[in-house]
Amino acid sequence: MKRIRSVFLIGLIFLLPFMMPTAMAANNSNSSFAAKQLQPIPHDGTVQVTFATNSFLEIEYFFDENLTQPIDTKNCYLNKGESIYISGIDVQNAKSNLYSFSEFRFVEYDLDGKRKNSTSTQVTTGLIYTLPNEFDGQGISVLPIGAYKDRELKFDSYYFDTKGELVELDSKMWDLNESGDLFANGSQTVSPVESYTISFNYSPYKDSYYFVKSSPDCFYHKETDSKVVFPKVNSNEEAQKYRVEMHPFITLRIKDTEHHWIVDDWFDKGAIKKIEKNSEVLEKYKKNSEEFKREEIDIKNLKTSDTITITVGKDYKLVCPNLNLTNSIPVEDGYQYTVRFPDNNEKKYQIEISTRNSNSEGRFEPREVSNGTISVSYENGGEIKSGVELPADGQSVVLKISGNDGFYVSGNDTESGIYKKTMSFSDYQKPTNKKSSPKIELDEKIL
């Protein structure tokens, strides 16, 4: 993309030959500085001064530091050693907010009216020029110069990984003014006097990521187009930072390591009866489909906002410690589970099908132990919390007991003062069983 030159001269400088000073008059009748309503006073001098007009800069000139003696810019003469002062500079450019005062340029003319020398200053208030004592020319011209600055735009597209760290997307997806010349994250410059449009095309990632949000808010987004369109920006608006946040699609795996649904299909019992996404039945995962002939099903292209509802047969339950898996609701011939995804950056979750506990409506209540804490977890991880459905009778669980501050656990199956043992859930429920119940003593530590 062609870069716009960063500096433009003033919008219009009327610099006529020095011999025509009356044509150089600056029209300050609408100037905010004219509110002082100070009238120019006669001032004798030997060197003529003319003032160029910049239509974007309003300036009032004075002979004195106290700004009490306005200069008549149509008829001004200075003596050597005398000065020009200003009260300030008012920038008024309706075309762009990136126009600003650059400098005063002072052009000297010799006795023949030819350009001789020039100096400049960037002072914006107070003294701007003093006629040198050694000046030997016919006059000077005062030129107020303005400049446009490039409009710099910044672009960023990203997602967050499972650790919560920001990861940049490096493909070329940004488009300026629908040029079709896509560019990657970074910065671009545009004309300070022209409006512009920005769009973001994430087609390279459409199968892996979905759009979450943008800054500023987008004007248009349609997932089937893989395109984000931002509102048109006028040349007098502030430069923007454009950011697009994406999120990896989620895959939900339903795993049946014991082949419940395959075996049960012979007897028409059905471990899984129905899978719905946002209340719509997923035909692909209906009973007798090819998907059901596998020991695991992958439901892909899910978002954190999606809700998955799974209906299982009356002899089964679903287990997923890492998901917001609500307790089942009894329905005709089975139980219904609702899966809601947490608002994090995980990409994969796994749900396991398990046999239902013989106490099908039972809820887990953890035990208590004096001077210590006790927890029960699934063998593959995830604590079994109060109020959840009971694990299957034969499901392996891990019992863990640790002492409170000042206490430790002694006896079999302890290490470093902590008891830990894997057992079936039915064994956990039999505290009188000597083989499965630890001989636990919470002793005070000897300090």
Image (tube, rainbow, N blue to C red):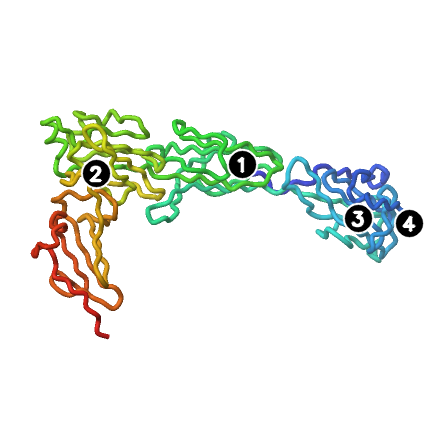
**Residue 150 higher or lower than 64, as above or below:** above
> Which residue is labeled 2 in the image?
318
Indicate the position of residue 367 as horizontal and vertical percent values. 21, 54
What residue is pinned by disc 1?
2
Amino acid at dot 2: Leu
Element carrying mark 1: loop
Assess disc 1: are there few (<14), some (14-19) or many (≥20) residues with their C-alpha within 10 Å of its C-alpha.
few
Residue visible at 7% across and 57% down in the picture:
434
What residue appears at the point 80 percent right and 52 percent down from the top-left corner?
Answer: 85
**In 3D space, how far apart are the residues under numbered discs 1 and 4 (Cα atoms)?**
51 Å
- Please give the residue where the numbered disc 4 appears in the rendered image: 43
Secondary element under disc 2, as helix, strand or loop, is: strand
| N-term mark: 3 or 2 | 3
Q: Are marks 1 and 3 in contact (CB under 8 Å)?
A: no
Q: Earlier in the sequence, mark 1 or mark 4?
A: 1
Image coordinates of residue 422 in percent, x first then y, are: 14, 53
Task: Point out the frontmost of discs 1 and 3.
Answer: 1
Count the numbered circles shown: 4
- Taking depth in this image into account, of 243 and 18 the one nearest to the observer is 243
Residue indicated by mark 3: 108
Mark-to-mark CA distance, 3 and 4: 20 Å
Give the Cα distance between marks 4 and 2.
97 Å
Give the amino acid type for the residue marked by disc 4 in the picture: His
N-terminal of the two: label 1 or label 3? 1
In the displayed orientation, state which residue is furthest to the bottom: 447
Q: CA distance from mark 2 to mark 1?
A: 59 Å
**Quick one: label 3 or label 4, which is nearer the N terminus?**
4
